[in-house]
Amino acid sequence: MLNPQNTYIALLVVQALHLLHHRLSKRHISFAEVISAVVLCVPPWAPVPALLLITAHLGLIVVQVIGSLWIRKLSPEW
């Protein structure tokens, strides 16, 4: 079921795994990780429309997954 609480947890898990991937592959993070961190600062119970939060969470999950798949092309080495 898609609700802000579930998509928040999903983004949190994907973000953690993506940052671990950056660390293990010795690649710098980009603005996508910073934006995800900022979005995660907004709690799912905040007075923000649920559809906006769900869309932001799912969009950033897609960005994180694509970033992990193409990490060699998109992120510079240390």
Image: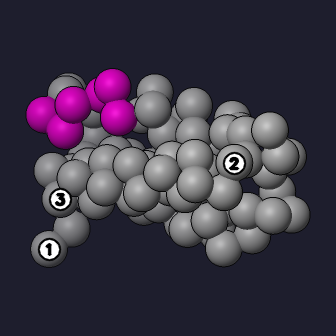
The answer to whether residue 22 is left or right of residue 8 is right
At horizontal 45% and vertical 32% (from top left) the residue drawn is 37
Residue type at mark 3 is: Asn
The answer to whether residue 58 is left or right of residue 7 is right
Does the magenta run of residues contain 61? no
Q: Which residues lie in the magenta part?
A: 40-45
Q: Where is residue 57 in the image (x, y as percent from the top left)?
A: 40, 52
At horizontal 14% and vertical 74% (from top left) the residue drawn is 1
Q: Of the residues under marks 3 and 1, which one precedes in the sequence?
A: 1
Q: In which quarter of the image is residue 29?
A: top right
At horizontal 28% and vertical 40% (from top left) the residue drawn is 49
Q: Of the residues under marks 2 and 3, which one precedes in the sequence?
A: 3
The answer to whether residue 6 is left or right of residue 54 is left
The residue singled out by tag 2 in the image is 26
Q: Is mark 2 on a helix, strand or loop?
A: loop
Q: Position of residue 13 (x, y in %)?
A: 31, 55
Q: Where is residue 11 in the image (x, y as percent from the top left)?
A: 35, 53
Q: What element carries label 1?
A: loop
The residue singled out by tag 3 in the image is 6
40 above or below 9?
above
10 above or below 16?
below
Q: What element carries label 3?
A: helix
Residue 1: assigned label: 1
Q: Distance between the Cα atoms at labels 1 and 2? A: 35 Å
Residue 15: assigned label: none
Q: Which is more foreground, mark 2 or mark 3?
A: 2
Residues at circles 3 and 1 in contact by the CB criterion of under 8 Å: yes
At horizontal 83% and vertical 46% (from top left) the residue drawn is 77
Q: Which is more foreground, mark 1 or mark 2?
A: 2
